[in-house]
Image (cartoon, grey):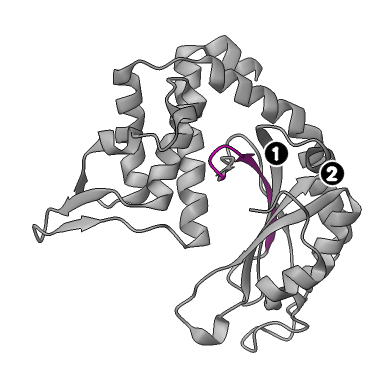
């Protein structure tokens, strides 16, 4: 992911559908179409700049390019990058499968991981296709900007909580259903294998990121108990599944924090 904001010509090259002037042909005449680039420009006007864009892979070729996921970073964080940065996440679809939504995420530079904050921690703001959107976008961006300090404090809380080996393994076991179905058997300790020296720590935030990286990037060996066949997991490319796993991991981390240090977790 770039540490510099993407220009419109770069956005066009990476995700042409951002500049689509009309919705998918199957939508109703009552559908209020909003070009994604218009929302991007409004977010830019509020001091958040796009640093990453991806388009979802879909089975229906006629819907290819109509679903997008963008990450924005605040001007202050672009000016003085830190180890972790709060990001604004924009999801959109022009095929009726979902409305615009804006939520918060945390980007960790050491491993290029992007964590999505669970709904229990931060509400997702829906930007409806019908009706006025200006106030919706402005209010969502303002709310995320206001909560930035609280989210950074929450990271510090997670970093201050040390986990025993048994607690780390409990975290890993709980995370398995987020990615794998019941008939898939894996060794949960494989999810705790760090991929860089910086991740050889036992604090809750680092463990969270190690598990997240292993779940999302794949290369985890296992066995299909129904067929007896061995397999190796692949990288998650689905935007929806990526978000589901991230939110689930954050929720588990929040529960662990509440058990380990309830007063600190509540204060954060």
Q: State the residue at coordinates (84%, 38%).
A: 76
Horizontally, residue 13 falls left or right of residue 155, namely right
| Image marks 1 and 2: residues in contact by CB distance under 8 Å | no
Residue pictured at 58% horizontal, 71% vertical: 97
Marked residue nearer the N-terminal end (1 or 2): 2
* Structural distance between the alpha carbons of marks 1 and 2: 11 Å
- Start and end of the magenta stretch? 100-112
Between 86 and 1, the one lying in front of the other is 1
Question: Is residue 26 visible to us here?
Answer: yes
Identify the image quadrant of the C terminus: top right
Residue 86 disc label: 1
Residue 199 located within the stretch drawn in magenta? no
Residue with the mark numbered 2: 75
The residue at 44%/79% (across/down) is: 59
Mark toward the viewer: 1 or 2: 2
- Give the overall secondary structure of the magenta segment: strand
For numbered disc 2, what is the local secondary structure? helix
At numbered mark 1, what does the secondary structure look like: helix, strand or loop? strand
The quarter holding residue 147 reads top right
């Amino acid at each position: 992911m770039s540490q510099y904001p993407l220009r419109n010509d770069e956005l066009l090259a990476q995700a042409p559908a951002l500049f689509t002037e009309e919705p998918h042909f199957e939508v109703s005449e009552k559908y209020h179409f909003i070009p994604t680039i218009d929302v991007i420009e409004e977010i830019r006007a509020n001091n958040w700049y796009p640093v990453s864009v991806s388009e979802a892979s879909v089975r229906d070729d006629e819907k290819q390019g109509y679903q997008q996921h963008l990450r924005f970073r605040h001007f202050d964080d672009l000016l003085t990058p830190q180890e972790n940065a709060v990001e604004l996440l924009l999801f959109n679809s022009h095929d009726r499968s979902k409305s615009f939504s804006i939520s918060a995420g945390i980007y960790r530079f050491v491993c290029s991981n992007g964590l999505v904050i669970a709904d229990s921690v931060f509400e997702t703001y829906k930007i409806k296709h019908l009706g006025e959107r200006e106030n919706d976008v402005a209010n969502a961006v303002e709310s995320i900007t206001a909560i930035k300090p609280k989210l950074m404090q929450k990271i510090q809380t997670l970093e201050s909580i040390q986990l025993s080996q048994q607690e780390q393994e409990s975290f890993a076991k709980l995370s398995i259903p987020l990615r794998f179905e019941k008939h898939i058997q894996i060794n949960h300790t494989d999810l705790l294998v760090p991929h860089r020296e910086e991740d050889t720590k036992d604090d809750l935030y680092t463990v969270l990121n190690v598990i997240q990286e292993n779940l999302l990037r794949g290369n985890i060996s296992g066995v299909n108990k129904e067929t007896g066949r061995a397999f190796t997991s692949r990288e998650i490319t689905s935007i929806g599944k990526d978000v589901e796993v991230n939110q689930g991991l954050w929720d588990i981390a929040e529960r662990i924090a509440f058990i380990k240090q309830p007063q600190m977790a509540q204060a954060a």
